[in-house]
């Protein structure tokens, strides 16, 4: 054995080649057993996360679209309900006017019929009073004159 007096940090000899070869084998094994599966898992996870982000974005767009559609439908339903309410109010007002007009016509018909009936009763009462007053005046004249008079009714 030879003693080397000169100490260097790196000495180039046969062990260096063995160390380089074993290091390269170690890298190959580590790459095959650890780095490739780890990179594959990280890539899969990355794709999964990006797919989830894409699904979230799609869901948010769907929510926005559905919200706007629901708002449009709500606005349309509100407008339709307002139109129906207005139409019902107009129909109710029209029916109320028709009922009032019919009641006014019925009142005027009843008033005319009542006036005719009253006029007929008044004329009948006048005829009756005329006959009664003639009879009464005839009796008064008999009493005043103290004699009997002949009574001839004038029709």
Image (cartoon, helix red, strand yellow):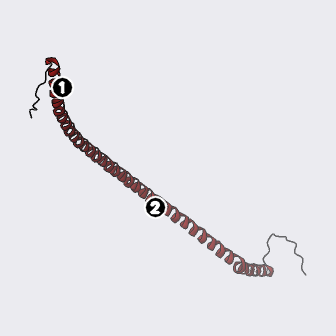
Looking at the picture, tell me which residue is in the foreground, 12 or 99: 99
Relative to 141, does residue 3 appear above or below in the rendering?
below
* Residue 65: mark in rendering: 2
Q: Residue at x 18, y 29 (%)?
A: 132
Q: Residue 96's spot in the image, x, y percent?
A: 31, 46
* Residue at disc 1, secondary structure: helix
Location of residue 9 in the rendering, given as x and y in whole percent from the top left corner: 81, 69
| Marker disc for residue 77 | none
> In this rendering, is residue 80 above or below 148?
below
Where is the N terminus found, in terms of image quarters?
bottom right
- Choose between 30 and 119: the one closer to the eye: 119
Q: Quadrant of residue 145?
A: top left
- Which quadrant of the figure contains the C terminus? top left
- As rendered, which of 40 and 90 lies closer to the eye? 90
Instruction: Identify the disc placed on residue 136.
Output: 1
Callout 2 secondary element: helix
């Amino acid at each position: 054995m030879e003693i080397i007096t000169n100490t260097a940090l790196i000495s180039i000899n046969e062990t260096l080649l063995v160390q380089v070869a074993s290091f390269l084998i170690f890298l190959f094994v580590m790459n095959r057993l650890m780095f490739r599966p780890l990179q594959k898992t990280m890539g899969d996870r990355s794709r999964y996360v990006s797919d989830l982000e894409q699904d979230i974005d799609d869901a948010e767009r769907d929510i926005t679209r559905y919200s706007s559609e629901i708002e449009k439908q709500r606005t349309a339903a509100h407008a339709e309900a307002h139109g129906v309410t207005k139409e019902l109010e107009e129909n109710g007002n029209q029916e109320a006017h028709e009922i009032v007009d019919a009641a006014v016509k019925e009142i005027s018909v009843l008033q005319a019929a009542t006036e005719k009936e009253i006029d007929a009763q008044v004329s009948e009462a006048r005829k009756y009073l005329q006959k009664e007053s003639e009879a009464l005046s005839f009796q008064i004249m008999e009493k005043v004159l103290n004699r009997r008079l002949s009574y001839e009714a004038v029709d």
